[in-house]
C-alpha cells in the first residue's frame, strides 16, 4: 500500500488528492448517467430493455418478466439452509429492534391562550429500495433498507435489483419474503433509479429512493433528487482506521480489505501514530490479498485508492480522519472511547479491536447504508425518518388570535403583504 508520512514535504498535496478523488468520481460518470436517465424518461421500458441487455446480459420479451413473483420469494425462503435462515432471522430481529428506537412520534401541545400546535408524522406512500447486485448480491442490504421502511409503516415498498444473466440470489429472495416485500423488479444501475424516480409502464414512480450502489447508482440518485427524495449518496464502500501502537496489524489489514473487496472504487485508509504498525500492516495486506476470492477487485482498490498515513500524534490523526469523513471508521487504540468526543464525521464508528466493520454490515443492528465520498459531513445513516415526513399542526381559538393577531398583522404590513395582514385583522374585527 502507499505509505505516506505527514512530515513528508509533499504530504499536503497527497492528502488533497485523497480528498478530491472521492468527489471527482461522481463528476466523471455524470454524463453517462444523465444520458441513461434521459433515455428512461423518453423510452421507459424499451430503454430498460436496452440497458439490461447491455449491462446485465439478458433479454426479456415482455417487461412483465422484470417482476419476481412472491411465490419465488417464498420458495427461496423455504429452500435456504436452516442455519442460514436462523442467521437471517437474527439479523432481522436485531435490525428491527434498533430501528424501532428511531421512530419519531406525532405530538400536540395545548397552550393556555387557546393555541394548539403539533406535528403529524406520516410515512411516504411508496418507497423504492435500490439493492445492489452487480458484482455480488446484497441480501443484507435488503434487510437494511426494507426494515426501516416497515418500521415507518410504508404501505408500498418497491425493490429494484440487477439480475446479471437473469439470475437472482436465493438469499435475497428469502430476505424479501421475510420482510413481506411484494414488488421486486430485476433491474439495476442508473436505469433502475431513473425508472423509480420517473416511473415507466412497468415500474411505478416512488416518493423516496433509498439504498446503496456503485458510482453509477450513487450518481443517478444525486441527479434525480428533487423529482423524488433520496436518503443520501451511498456509493462505493469506504473504511478509515485510526490506530495506535497497541493495534494488531493483521486485524487492521483484513478490515481494510473487507471494504476493498466490494469494489475497485472502494477506499481503505489507515491513519496511525506508529510507523512500525504501518509497515507491518502493509505486509499483512499483501499476505491476505492473495488469499481473497475477489483478489483482483480488492487489489485494484488497494493499489489505486488505499493509503497508510503516519501521523505525528493522535490529535493530527483525528483531524485528518475528520477531513476524510469516512463511511466506516474503526478506532483501534488503547482506549477507543476516549477518542469518541473528538470524532466529528463518520457514517458509523466501530470502537475496539473486537468490533470489525463487517459485524455492522450484517448483524449488529445499526444500518449499513451509509454516506460516502465525504458526505458523512452532512448525511446520517439510513434511518426510519428517511421514510417519513412531517406536517405542522396549527389551530387558534378566538382568544389565541386576539392575543397574537396584531403582532402577526404588523409583521405582514412590514413585508407589504396587505392581504396577509387583512386576513388576520378581519378575524380581530369580527371577534
Ligand atoms: N455506501 C453503502 O452504504 C454501501 C452498502 C453496500 C454496498 N455498497 C456499494 O455498492 C456497490 C455495489 O456495486 P455493484 O457494481 O456490485 O452493484 P450495483 O447494483 O450497484 O451496480 C450494478 C449496475 O451498475 C450498472 N453499471 C455497471 N457498469 C456500468 C457502466 N459502465 N455504465 C453504466 N452503468 C453501469 C449496471 O446497470 C449494473 O446493473 C459497491 O460499490 C459497494 O461498495 C455501498
Ligand atoms: N460494507 C457495505 C457498506 O459499505 C455493506 C455490506 C453489505 N454486505 C457486506 N457489506
Ligand atoms: Zn461490507
Image: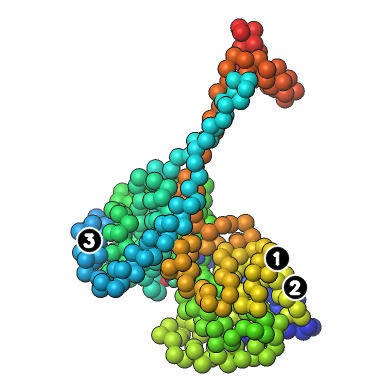
Label 2 Cα neighbours within 10 Å, binned few <14 / some 14-19 / many ≥20: few
On screen, residue 62 above or below 249: above
Q: Between disc 1 and disc 2, whose residue precedes?
A: 2
Q: Residue furthest top?
A: 430
Q: Position of residue 111 (x, y in %)?
A: 61, 25
Label 3: element kind: helix
Asked whether, in this view, residue 57 is left or right of residue 241, the answer is: left
Q: Position of residue 294 (x, y in %)?
A: 43, 83
Pick the residue in front: 41 or 214. 214
Q: CA distance from mark 2 to mark 3?
A: 52 Å
Q: Residue 69's mark?
A: none
Label 2: element kind: helix
Q: Position of residue 99 (x, y in %)?
A: 46, 55
Q: Residue 342's mark?
A: 1
The part of the image, by quadrant, that contains residue 93 is bottom left
Q: Is residue 190 visible?
A: no
Can you identify the residue that label 3 sits on? 74
Q: Between disc 2 and disc 3, whose residue precedes?
A: 3
- For the C terminus, the image quarter is top right
Q: Are marks 3 and 1 in contact (CB under 8 Å)?
A: no
Q: Residue 315's mark?
A: 2
Query: Which tag is nearer the camera, tag 3 or tag 1?
Result: 1
Query: Which tag is nearer the camera, tag 2 or tag 3?
Result: 2
Query: Which residue is depicted at the point 25% across and 73% down?
Result: 81
Pick the residue in front: 244 or 374. 244
Query: Which residue is depicted at the point 46% across and 63% down?
Result: 365
Amino acid at each position: 500500500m502507499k505509505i505516506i508520512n505527514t512530515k513528508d514535504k509533499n504530504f499536503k498535496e497527497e492528502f488533497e488528492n485523497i480528498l478530491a478523488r472521492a468527489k471527482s468520481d461522481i463528476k466523471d460518470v455524470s454524463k453517462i448517467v444523465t444520458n441513461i436517465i434521459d433515455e428512461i424518461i423518453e423510452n421507459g421500458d424499451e430503454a430498460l430493455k436496452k440497458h439490461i441487455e447491455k449491462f446485465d446480459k439478458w433479454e426479456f420479451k415482455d417487461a412483465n418478466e422484470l417482476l419476481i413473483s412472491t411465490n419465488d420469494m417464498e420458495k427461496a425462503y423455504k429452500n435456504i439452509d436452516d442455519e442460514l435462515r436462523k442467521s437471517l432471522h437474527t439479523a432481522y430481529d436485531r435490525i428491527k429492534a434498533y430501528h424501532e428506537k428511531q421512530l419519531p412520534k406525532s405530538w400536540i401541545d395545548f397552550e393556555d391562550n387557546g393555541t394548539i400546535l403539533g406535528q403529524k408524522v406520516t410515512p411516504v406512500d411508496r418507497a423504492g429500495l435500490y439493492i445492489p447486485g452487480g458484482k455480488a448480491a446484497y441480501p443484507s442490504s435488503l434487510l437494511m433498507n426494507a426494515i426501516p421502511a416497515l418500521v415507518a409503516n410504508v404501505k408500498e415498498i418497491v425493490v429494484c435489483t440487477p439480475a446479471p444473466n437473469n439470475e437472482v440470489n436465493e438469499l435475497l429472495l428469502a430476505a424479501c419474503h421475510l420482510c413481506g416485500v411484494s414488488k421486486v423488479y430485476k433491474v439495476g444501475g442508473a436505469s433502475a433509479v431513473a425508472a423509480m424516480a420517473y416511473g415507466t409502464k412497468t415500474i411505478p414512480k416512488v416518493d423516496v429512493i433509498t439504498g446503496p450502489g456503485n458510482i453509477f447508482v450513487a450518481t443517478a440518485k444525486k441527479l434525480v433528487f428533487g423529482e423524488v427524495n433520496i436518503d443520501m449518496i451511498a456509493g462505493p464502500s469506504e473504511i478509515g482506521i485510526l490506530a495506535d501502537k497497541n493495534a494488531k496489524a493483521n486485524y487492521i489489514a483484513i478490515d481494510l480489505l473487507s471494504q476493498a473487496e466490494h469494489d475497485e472504487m472502494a477506499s481503505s485508509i489507515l491513519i496511525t501514530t506508529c510507523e512500525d504498525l504501518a509497515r507491518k500492516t502493509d505486509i499483512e495486506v499483501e499476505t491476505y490479498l492473495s488469499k481473497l476470492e475477489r483478489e483482483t477487485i480488492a487489489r485494484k482498490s488497494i493499489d489505486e485508492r488505499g493509503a497508510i498515513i503516519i501521523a505525528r500524534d493522535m490529535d493530527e490523526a483525528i483531524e485528518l480522519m475528520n477531513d476524510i469523513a469516512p463511511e466506516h471508521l474503526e478506532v483501534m487504540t488503547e482506549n477507543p472511547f476516549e477518542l469518541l468526543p473528538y470524532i466529528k464525521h463518520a457514517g458509523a464508528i466501530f470502537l475496539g479491536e473486537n468490533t470489525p466493520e463487517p459485524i455492522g454490515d450484517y448483524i449488529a443492528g445499526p444500518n449499513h447504508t451509509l454516506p460516502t465520498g465525504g458526505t458523512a459531513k452532512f448525511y446520517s445513516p439510513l434511518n426510519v425518518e428517511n421514510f417519513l415526513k412531517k406536517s405542522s399542526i396549527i389551530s387558534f381559538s378566538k382568544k389565541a388570535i386576539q392575543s397574537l393577531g396584531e403582532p402577526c398583522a404588523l409583521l405582514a404590513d412590514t413585508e407589504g403583504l396587505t392581504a396577509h395582514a387583512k386576513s388576520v385583522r378581519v378575524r380581530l374585527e369580527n371577534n
